[in-house]
Image (cartoon, rainbow, N blue to C red):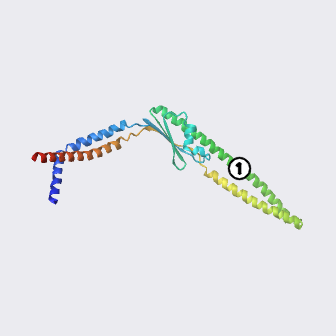
């Protein structure tokens, strides 16, 4: 039984060797078919424009929402438009179009409009925070003046018991308020230091990848597999014909 299996395998190998030219012809045909398929498969456009936008210290949620950006800034864009969050603090925009010049114009116009809106929000947020810090510093100066006055009153020793208790209470409240304002100011100053200016990280237009290499390789692999199947079937049919002709 083992010898018969070896004989059958040997017969197939000999047959494959005699028909080895088909291992060149059939895979080559399938490779060409795979390469040709890259031109037949429909694409969204011949060119794709990609832009990566850094949101930075933008606080408005809408400016971090891809669908909102498409609705607000993509109305005049020609071609197919996509937007999605590519990574933390980054939004990626893709536009597909057959006209490269029109695509470059639309991509730059849209990304510039988004950048402008983000910078306006960033500057507004920074301005408000800086204004709050100034107000806190002004309040802090007033509280320090109150603190100095109350301390002087207590040190003079000219207050009666009731007045001394009242001034001591004011002093305690003032110290607590000073600590609160200082902590808030420190927090807001830290926030400003962490604010990052938004902007366009990258912007490019290039031809759409038609996956010619991938499809050609897939055709080659499929062609080799098909060659084995065809030759095995060929060999099987020859053996079957020989068997029935012999009978």
Q: x%, y% of residue 176?
A: 75, 61
Could you say which quadrant of the image residue 112 lies in?
A: top right
Q: Give above or below for 49 relative to 12.
A: above
Is 232 on the left-hand or right-hand side of 40?
Answer: left
Q: Residues within 10 Å of mark 1 (few under 14, many from 20)?
A: some
Q: x%, y% of residue 22?
A: 21, 43
Q: Residue at x 76, y 61 (%)?
A: 175
Is 75 on the left-hand or right-hand side of 4?
Answer: right
Q: How many marks?
A: 1
State the residue in front, 11 or 242: 242
Could you say which quadrant of the image residue 146 lies in?
A: bottom right
Q: x%, y% of residue 154?
A: 84, 65
Residue at the outermost front position: 247
Q: x%, y% of residue 194?
A: 61, 52
Q: Residue at x 66, y 44 (%)?
A: 124
> Which residue is labeled 1 in the image?
132
Q: Residue at x 24, y 42 (%)?
A: 26
State the residue in front, 4 or 152: 4
State the residue in front, 193 or 18: 18
Q: Residue at x 71, y 57 (%)?
A: 182
Is 19 on the left-hand or right-hand side of 192?
Answer: left
The quadrant of the rendering that contains the N terminus is bottom left
Q: Secondary structure at mark 1?
A: helix
State the residue in front, 204 or 239: 239
Residue at the outermost left position: 246
Q: Give above or below for 83 relative to 13.
A: above
């Amino acid at each position: 039984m083992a010898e018969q299996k070896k004989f059958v395998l040997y017969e197939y190998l000999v047959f494959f060797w005699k028909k080895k030219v088909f291992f060149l012809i059939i895979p080559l045909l399938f490779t060409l078919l795979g390469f040709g398929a890259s031109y037949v498969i429909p694409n969204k456009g011949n060119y794709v424009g990609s832009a990566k936008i850094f949101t930075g210290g933008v606080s408005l949620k809408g400016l971090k929402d891809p669908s909102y950006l498409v609705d607000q800034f993509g109305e005049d864009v020609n071609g197919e438009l996509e937007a999605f969050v590519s990574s933390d603090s980054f939004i990626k925009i893709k536009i597909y179009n057959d006209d490269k010049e029109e695509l470059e114009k639309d991509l730059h116009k849209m990304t510039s409009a988004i950048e402008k809106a983000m910078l306006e929000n960033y500057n507004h947020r920074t301005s408000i925070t800086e204004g709050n810090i100034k107000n806190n510093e002004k309040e802090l100066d007033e509280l320090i003046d109150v603190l100095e006055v109350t301390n002087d009153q207590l040190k003079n020793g000219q207050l009666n018991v009731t007045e001394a208790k009242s001034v001591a209470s004011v002093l305690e409240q003032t110290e607590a308020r000073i600590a609160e304002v200082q902590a808030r100011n420190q927090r807001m100053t830290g926030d400003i230091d962490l604010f990052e200016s938004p902007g366009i990280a990258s912007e490019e237009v290039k031809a759409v990848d038609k996956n010619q290499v991938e499809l050609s390789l897939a055709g080659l692999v499929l062609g080799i597999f098909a060659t084995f199947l065809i030759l095995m079937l060929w060999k099987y049919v020859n053996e079957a014909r020989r068997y029935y002709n012999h009978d």
